[in-house]
Image: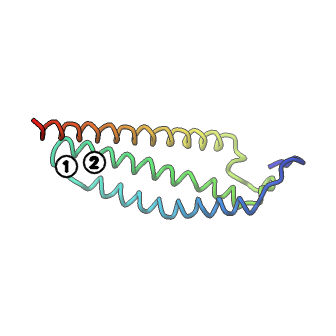
Amino acid sequence: MPTSPDFEPNTTVDRILASFFIFCTTAGLPCNLLALYYFLRQRSRNNNSGYFLKLYAVISSVDVIICLKHFPLIQSLLRDRRENQGLLFENHVFCSTWFLISMSSMMVSISLVLTLSVSRLLVITRLCVDTTA
C-alpha cells in the first residue's frame, strides 16, 4: 500500500483489529454452523414454526458468510502493509467481489432481522388479540 507523508500505517492498531476479527471468527463460525445444523434438523409443528425455523436457518447462513469474509481482512491486517506481498486485496476482481459480498451480506442480514422482528410482532399481536377476545 503506498504511503504518503500524511499517512503512516499503525501496525499496533492493525494487530488489535486482526485479533478482534480472529476472535469474532473463531467464536462466530462454529456457533453459527451449529445453529444452522440445529435449525435444519428441527421439524416444524405447524406452518408458523416452520417459517421461523427457515428464517433462523437463513440468518445463520448469512452469519456464516459474514464470518468467512473476515479471513481476507485478517490476512491484510496481519501483514505490514508493504507492497507486493501477495495480498488478496491487490487483485481487482477479488477486491470487487469481496466488497459485493460484504455489502450484500450486511444488507441481507439487516433485512432478515427486520423480517424476524416484524414476524414476531405479528405473532405477539395475534396472541394478544386472541387472549382478550
- The amino acid beneath tag 2 is Leu
Q: Position of residue 103 (x, y in %)?
A: 55, 39
- In the figure, is residue 132 to the left or right of 103? left
Give the crowd class for mark 2: few <14, some 14-19, many >=20 residues within 10 Å. many
Q: Position of residue 89 (x, y in %)?
A: 69, 48
Disc sitting over residue 76 in the figure:
none
Q: Secondary structure at mark 2?
A: helix
Check disc 2 and report the residue beneath it.
53
- Residue contact between numbered discs 2 and 1, judged by CB atoms under 8 Å: yes
Pick the front one: 18 or 82: 18
Q: Quarter of the image for the C terminus: give it.
A: top left
Q: Position of residue 123 (x, y in %)?
A: 23, 40
Separation of disc 2 and disc 1 at Cα? Answer: 7 Å
- The quarter holding residue 128 reads top left
- In the figure, is residue 21 to the left or right of 127? right
> In the image, what residue occupies the spot 58% across and 54% down?
70
> In the image, what residue occupies the spot 33% across and 48% down?
56
- The amino acid beneath tag 1 is Ser
Q: Position of residue 8 (x, y in %)?
A: 83, 53
Report how many numbered discs are placed on residues in the image: 2
Coloured how? Answer: rainbow
> In the image, what residue occupies the spot 80% across and 56% down?
82
Please, which residue is most extreme toward the front here? 132
Please, which residue is most extreme toward the right here? 5
- In the figure, is residue 30 to the left or right of 55? right
Check disc 1 and report the residue beneath it.
44
